[in-house]
Amino acid sequence: MLEELIGHLILFAVRFVDGILELFGVLRAGSRTLRENSRVGESPMEAESRQWWDRLYNRWFWFSLLLVGIAVAIGMRQ
């Protein structure tokens, strides 16, 4: 019972953070589309921001995969 609750809480946390990151991703994509349509080059600060977001998404993917794996392992122990 407790293991199942912990597994559900982990999955909820992963879905919640994933939803927030998806919202920011949509906003960034819209901003990028507007910038590309204006044909203005990318500033060093924008490049650094883009690289930071790319690293965040990459690390979140692997961390969320690990958390979902843990939740599944906890649920399968029953």
Image (cartoon, rainbow, N blue to C red):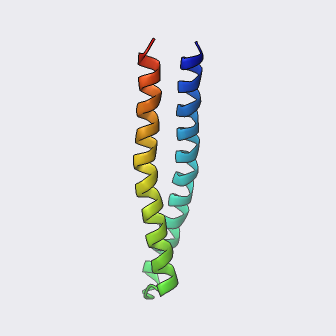
The N terminus sits in image quarter: top right
- For the point 43% across and 55% down, which residue is it? 59
Which one is in front, 78 or 17?
78
Kindly identify the residue that appears in the image at 40 percent across and 32 percent down.
Answer: 69
Image x and y of residue 28, in percent = 52, 66
Q: Establish if 37 lies above or below 18.
A: below
Image quarter hosting the C terminus: top left
On screen, residue 32 above or below 68: below
Q: Is 39 situated left or right of 12 in this image? A: left
Task: Identify the residue shown where x is 47% and y is 60%.
Answer: 56
Name the one closer to the observer, 26 or 62: 62
For image coordinates 43% across by 64% down, the residue present is 54
Q: Position of residue 58 (x, y in %)?
A: 40, 56
Residue 77, percent across and down?
43, 15
Check the image and report above or below for 6 versus 61.
above
Q: Horizontal and vertical percent for residue 31?
A: 52, 71
